[in-house]
Amino acid sequence: MSNNIFKNLLIVGGGGAIAQLFNVLSTPLITRLYSPSSYGEWAYIIAMVALFSDVSVLRYELAVVLPKTNIAAANIVGLSVILAIVSTSMMCIVMVLWGDLLFGELVQWLWLLPPLVIMPGIYQTLLSWCTRTKDFFVLSVAGILLVLVTIIVQLGGVWYSTQSSMGLIWGTLIGQLVALGFIGIIVVCKNKSLFSEISLKGMQSVFVQFKNYPLYMVPYTLISVFKNRTVIYILNYAGDIVNIGYYAFSDRLIRLPGNFISGAIRPVFFQQASVSGLKAIEALLVRALFLINRFSTPLLVFFIFEASDIFLLIFGKDWQAASFYAIVLSFPAYFSIHINWLDRGMDVLGCQKLVFQLEMTFSVLSLLGLVFGAFFLENIDYGIMLQAGILCFYQGFWLICFFKNARFDFRKLLNLCLSCSVLVVTCTCFLFFGKRMLPIMWAEGIYLMVYAYACLRILPNDWGKLKSEVTNLPLDDYK
């Protein structure tokens, strides 16, 4: 049992690590080949597409793992494909009527929007199917292909159209197409007989059975999209395409660690939680939270102190100004690293309504903070800082709600908070006083060496304890 879980974690985590490595290595090239304004154009298009693509299958992709029978799950897949087609058709009508108003000078790219809307929903549905069937190798390869093809096209596209967003847009489109084609062919070939049993009656049945997903998760997702993208919409309204590039680039960069951790852990966690229940894996989850915290906290402190120099050194002078957004966004991203991979746990608990209520409440608060800073204080930077603070509080409160509904031991959460606080204070004092007592380069070098030593000595011990937690977990398979 233990070997199976860690084998799956290794496969998914290894694939995620390779994909994120490509992202990290390509980012300095992207920033030197594309200007902030070009990046801003691409980011605005993606932000508009997200309004449709993130809910194109009414979030039924999240339900694929839950049914007790594979036939029911296959009907969810069929339902999701139909919903994606319907959603894309509705989007086309909207674009015909209001495309000029929504996209302005970028209206030339409207014809690319249908595939950018229809593909992500189907792709995520098939990823959920691979999670259900524990085909984590296919899931990992698809993720690598998505990133690798996107990067290759984006890097190559700049030679065709220098300092234009064309290469970035085409890279996104072709990367999604290749990844969807790969996973689609494999999943269909492996499950022909199962998918042949998809029926209208079966799809109607799962549509009603899992109605909480369109009822609660669609509004939840749309609110989340607005919460995360409103800065881009406001900046576009102000005609500040360069700051859109700064903000979008910083947001994407800061999310890389969280995307890697959630991408590596979430599929395995969700599959195991759906089978065993959350209470059975409480010790495992708490141990994982401590491990993530000890690894990420020193990096957060170092980044806050050195962000400006890091951006100048790695991404070039044109992008140094983006470091401000990166520092502000790093705080909610730090909280997100701890909880993003747990979000499907609320689905296992059947708490979609609670999740919707939390997202609605704090999204409204964060948007009010953003609008207050942008329009009343007349400085969107203040709005972004207010929004970031509210999001930090939201994610901490979410974790408390998760522990309560899962009936976990709150003392463990308090110990996590205490451990985090001690680590933050220790790292901050080390860097703050070290840079005043020693040459800056020396202080930074000593800090990183101590961090590396701690990783080599302490984290392997924590990893061993984490592995011991899963030895006796129950395991059942879907029928």
Image: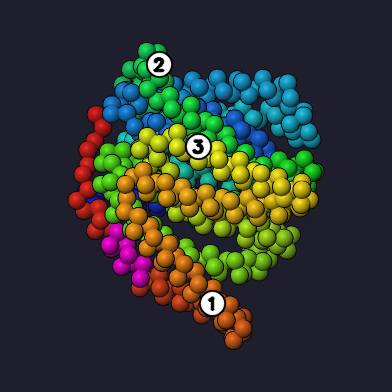
Place of residue 82 in the rendered image (x, y in percent of width and height, measured from the top left): 49, 20
Place of residue 9 in the rendered image (x, y in percent of width and height, measured from the top left): 34, 50
- Is 196 within the magenta? no
Q: CA distance from mark 1 to mark 3?
A: 39 Å
Magenta-drawn segment: 458-466
In which quarter of the view is residue 91 placed?
A: top right
Residue carrying label 1: 429
Q: Residues within 10 Å of mark 1 (few under 14, many from 20)?
A: few
243 sits to left or right of 298: right
Q: Residues within 10 Å of mark 3 (few under 14, many from 20)?
A: some
Q: Residue at x 63, y 58 (%)?
A: 328
Q: Quadrant of the C terminus?
A: top left
In which quarter of the view is residue 149 placed?
A: top right
Circles 1 and 2 in contact, beta carbons < 8 Å: no
Q: Residue at x 22, y 48 (%)?
A: 473
Answer with mark 1 or mark 2, whichever residue precedes in sequence.
2
Q: What SS does tag 3 mark? A: helix
Answer with mark 3 or mark 2, whichever residue precedes in sequence.
2
Q: Extreme top residue here?
A: 201
Residue carrying label 3: 357
Q: What SS does tag 2 mark? A: helix
Inspect the image, locate mark 3, and give the three-letter code of the amino acid beneath it: Gln
